[in-house]
Image (tube, helix red, strand yellow):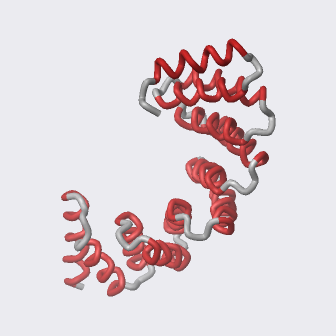
């Protein structure tokens, strides 16, 4: 917690030597390695922790993160799936697995998991945003609009959600509503590059 990773590793390794069956010691070693990008070391430690504690979903979710960061998405899917089996009510695990499915083009499975996660936590903005993006990419503009309007009610300053809402309105043929949202975005604290793009859209829509 103090950022002293080497001292933490020494203590965790000592704990693991003193009790080779202490799953959490190996898990904490894996967490430190994951934090600093030592993915192979993290995988080894976390796989040991998972083998020692067959019921723990957190260890398997951490392994999912390791494999995801290593670009091994199929393995990451398997580990997140194992995490969900052990903690079926976890919204975070469902969201992570759904996002992986989305990256892999398994869109129906991603949508099912996002909706399942939202049944448990209806106002989780991260999950709503990813679901809205899935709808937007699939041309399901009415569904995307519904999701992004919900985000706007929860977090009016969520810039990416506002931009996606405007895009969805525009693709749905609702130019005036798209323009209104773009104009709201210009009132937010956005970067110069995005501001230039939104201004271009505003000028085009005003000229129509």
Residue 169 in view, yes or no: yes
* Picture layout, residue 94 above or below residue 134: above
Q: Please state which of residues 1 and 128 is positioned toward the viewer in this rendering.
A: 1
Place residue 17 in its image quadrant: top right
Q: Residue at x 73, y 24 (%)?
A: 22
Q: Please state which of residues 88 and 203 is positioned toward the viewer in this rendering.
A: 88
Q: Quadrant of the C terminus?
A: bottom left
Q: In the visual, does 80 lie left or right of 151?
A: right
Residue 194 x/y as whole percent? 25, 61
Place residue 167 in its image quadrant: bottom left
Q: In the visual, does 21 lie left or right of 80?
A: right
* Picture layout, residue 157 above or below residue 191: below
Residue 109 x/y as whole percent? 69, 57
* Picture layout, residue 88 above or below residue 10: below
Q: In the visual, does 97 lie left or right of 8?
A: right
Q: Residue at x 68, y 43 (%)?
A: 80
Residue 138 in view, yes or no: no
Q: Residue at x 78, y 45 (%)?
A: 86
Place residue 76 in its image quadrant: top right
Residue 24 x/y as whole percent? 68, 29
Q: Residue furthest right?
A: 54
């Amino acid at each position: 917690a103090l950022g002293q990773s080497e001292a933490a590793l020494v203590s965790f390794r000592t704990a693991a030597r003193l009790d080779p069956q202490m799953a959490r010691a190996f898990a904490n070693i894996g967490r430190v390695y994951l934090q600093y990008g030592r993915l192979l070391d993290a995988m080894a430690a976390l796989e040991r922790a998972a083998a020692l504690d067959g019921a723990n979903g957190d260890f398997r979710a951490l392994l999912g993160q390791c494999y995801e960061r290593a670009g091994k998405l199929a393995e990451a899917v398997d580990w997140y799936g194992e995490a969900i089996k052990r903690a079926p009510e976890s919204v975070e695990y469902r969201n992570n697995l759904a996002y992986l499915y989305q990256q892999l083009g398994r869109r129906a499975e991603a949508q099912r998991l996002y909706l399942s996660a939202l049944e448990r936590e209806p106002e989780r903005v991260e999950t709503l945003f990813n679901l809205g993006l899935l709808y937007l990419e699939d041309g399901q503009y009415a569904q995307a609009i519904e999701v992004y309007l919900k985000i706007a009610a929860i977090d009016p300053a969520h810039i990416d959600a506002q931009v996606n809402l405007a895009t969805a309105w525009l693709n749905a043929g609702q130019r005036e509503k798209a323009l209104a949202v773009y104009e709201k975005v210009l009132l937010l604290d956005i970067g110069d590059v995005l501001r230039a793009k939104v201004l271009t859209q505003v000028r085009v829509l005003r000229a129509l």
